[in-house]
Image (cartoon, helix red, strand yellow):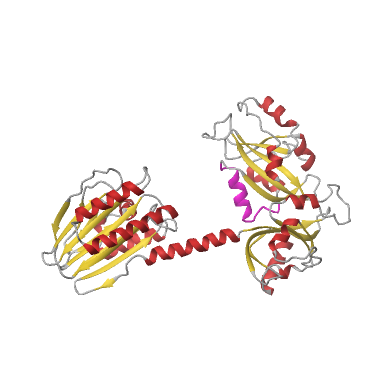
Amino acid sequence: MREREKNSLPMPTVPAVEDWLQIETMYKQFPLGIALIEAQSNDRHILFVNDRFKERTGYSAEDLNGALNDWLEILFPFTWNTTKVISLTEHFFANVQADLYLTIRRKQGDFFTGHIQIEPIFSGNDTTEHPCFYMMMFMNERAGSSTPGRQSLPAVNEAWIESVPGACYVFNLHNQLVYHNEEANTFFSDAPSSFGYQSIEAVLPMTAEDWKAFRNEISNHREIAFCTIKDPFSGQYKAAEWSFFPRYDETFTLIGFFGIGQDVSRFARIHQELSRAVQSQKDSLPLNITGKKFDFTSFYYPHFYLSGDTYGYYFDQKNNKLIIYLVDIMGHGIYTAMQTSALNTLFQTSVKRQRISAEGQMKQMNEHCCLHLPADSFAAAMIAEIDFNRLSCHIVSAGIPHLLHITNEHTERKSFAGTPLGMFEQSMFRRRSFQLTRESRLIFGTDGFFETLDTFQDANTVTCEGLYSFVQRAALAGRSQDDTSAIILKLK
């Protein structure tokens, strides 16, 4: 409904910022209450309010003279000193549209709860630069006369409640439901045609202590948020996002509260499925092992839930060789994770069969990536063969350019050139070798590992354990901007 209201009021192209006479003429008779806020300095002064804004609030631009924090405290006194003021303030520094429901104080001293929309206004159709100014619109307001001193309780404004997106409930101070909109019925199974005076305790599953805290927040004119509700007719809990805020009469006496919520059960289910996918991806990775010939330790930290990194190993007992592979597909998220899973399966099968050389295996993987990865995507990979008979390491690189070779004497970063998988159909891959010792330790890592290392630490100044521990802490602290995966191999 709000979209239809907004779309019925087309916004003309905004003239140059200097032409304020034309801007004032454009918005003066606009049917919604509008305030224009400067965008050129951090003070965010109110530059202009139209006639409808003055009619609704009683304030002129001169009445609200002052910096952002000053006029916010005048207009929204009960949002002030709460966590919501942080969100409210940030909207005037972000070039995105925002919708808020706030308690607004008129100049006469009474209050109303209104739907506020904030959006940046650009000159012409160019939205790549900073906005000319921000526009704050009062989309509607709830029940309550603006005449001070009236003692009767305000009637419930049914039109406003029905226009609210999502379920809207009105409760009195006894926690009894006195009104709800039609959409509220969809929140409950087999709901009766009228809720009557259904108690809110049947809707929100809270303890006595929770209710005490709830009432305290309402009494102190603060908004409250909940994430779940209980269906009183089925006894089941349903995922929903709720915002509760106070309801006043015309003398600003607290008489109850509103509850506005939207069903997020579908999103909760998506999140549940996402969590299962995250766990499945972790389960596909090998466990740490301690053996007679080597210790294999790894860590894996996705930057955003699902990762484009994967790795694995296979020990060939017949030839006394350990084969390790490491893959880093470009990107994050569900699509990348699906590609990673497929490539991980191919690598696992290929290294176990060993029907062709490591160079041949990498060529096969390149053919797969050229066929199945998007044209603007690619995968970096590395195959390492550790020969315990000859104490040598053979590397075939396809875009993972480094590994660390640590001995008792020093740490050496070895580099290997190679074209990432999926870039060119005719890419060739070469084997490069170096010698090991019984004290050698090898650290294999994806881009996220080495980028974190290069940004925050010098690899040549720490021990193997210290290096591993540092990058692990950096990944957990969110300092890495990429998926961070690494393998430590200790020879014995």
Q: How far across and how far down the image is residue 287, in percent?
A: 32, 69
Q: How far across and how far down the image is residue 149, in percent?
A: 88, 51
Quadrant of residue 155 within the rendered picture: bottom right
Going 75% across and 45% down the picture, which residue do you hit? 140
The image shows residue 82, relative to residue 22, as above or below, that is below
Quadrant of residue 130 within the rendered picture: top right
Residue located farthest toward the left when viewing the structure as drawn: 390
Q: How many marks?
A: 0
Quadrant of residue 426 within the rendered picture: top left
* Viewport quadrant of the C terminus: bottom left
- State left or right for residue 461 relative to residue 435: right
Going 74% across and 49% down the picture, which residue do you hit? 163
**Span of residues in magenta:** 77-94
Residues 146 and 435: in front is 435
Q: Report if residue 90 lies within the magenta region.
A: yes
Going 72% across and 62% down the picture, which residue do you hit? 218
Q: Report if residue 222 lies within the magenta region.
A: no
Residue 220 shows up from this direction = no
Residues 82 and 405: in front is 405
Residue 175 shows up from this direction = yes
Q: How far across and how far down the image is residue 374, in percent?
A: 38, 45
Going 79% across and 56% down the picture, which residue do you hit? 248
Q: How far across and how far down the image is residue 10, in percent?
A: 68, 33
